[in-house]
Image (cartoon, grey):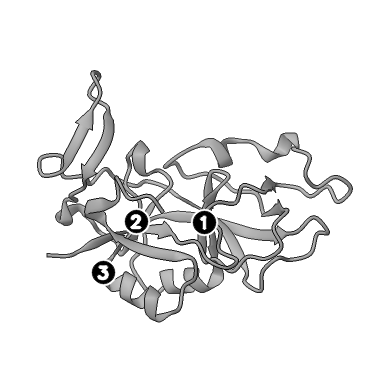
Amino acid sequence: MENYFGIFEKTGKYTPIGLSEGILHSELNPKDPFTPLNSDSGDWRKLINSKVELPKELWFITRDKHYSFDLRYDSGGFFISNHLLELFDKFNTGNFTSTKLHILNKQLQPVSDKQYKYVKFYDSEDMIDYENSKIDFDKNGVVKKIWTLKLKGSEVKNDIFMINSWIFNRRLFCSDKFKEAALQGGVEGLQFISADDAGVFKP
């Protein structure tokens, strides 16, 4: 039986858990890069699990000095390095759309040697095995907490995928085969946690 893993953030030098010191723009204002713009928002950013048309390029301006992570979730999508996306291309991957992402400091200089894209997955399916998972529901039948997650292996079609559940709308999952390739490929700032524990694990 196939084993599946949640892809979680791992803190380290230049790989913070979250990117709280930044702002994402669809156009760049060099004179005042930290001020929000009307164009920063839109369906491309707000919609979940829907195919959207992304801006031709995006700019993430940060107060941090340097990054070396390969994947983070921020601003409604995933920031994924080209290094990791090249690995995606070698495996069956869920549907996604992407656009060029510039990650710059307040002087508008690159903060990483890596190149990135902003990525949004869409048409993901709910492949949770509710019968064999341990789940708490609220009074309306909505999933409140997943203590033990089991997936319907027959419905998992890809090596990298998302689960259509609000609890996991910021989380990618993968097969054991992809996990091993990613570790061998030297991905940075990531850890692979058994899908069983994905509902309770805290990075």
Give the alpha-carbon distance from disc 1 to disc 3, as whole Å. Answer: 20 Å
Query: Which part of the image, by quadrant, shows the N terminus?
Result: bottom left
The residue lying at 68 percent from left, 48 percent from top is: 22
Left or right: 54 as drawn, with respect to 104: left
Spot the residue most to the top: 139
For image coordinates 67% across by 54% down, the residue present is 56
**Label 1: element kind:** strand
* Dot 3: element: helix
Which label's residue is closer to the chain start, 2 or 1?
1
**Place of residue 189 in the rendered image (x, y in percent of width and height, measured from the top left):** 49, 66
Tell me residue 5's x, y (percent): 29, 60
The quarter holding residue 191 reads: bottom left
Q: What residue is pinned by disc 2? A: 161
Identify whether 79 is placed above or below 20: below
Name the quadrant containing residue 172: bottom left
Amino acid carrying label 2: it is Phe
Query: Which residue is label 3 attached to?
Result: 176
Q: CA distance from mark 2 to mark 3?
A: 13 Å
**Residue at the spot of label 1:** 72
Q: Provide residue 155's location: percent of width, then percent of height.
A: 19, 52
Q: Is residue 182 above or below residue 202?
A: below
* Displayed quadrant of residue 68: bottom right
Q: Secondary structure at mark 2?
A: strand
Relative placement, left or right, of 137 versus 92 is: left
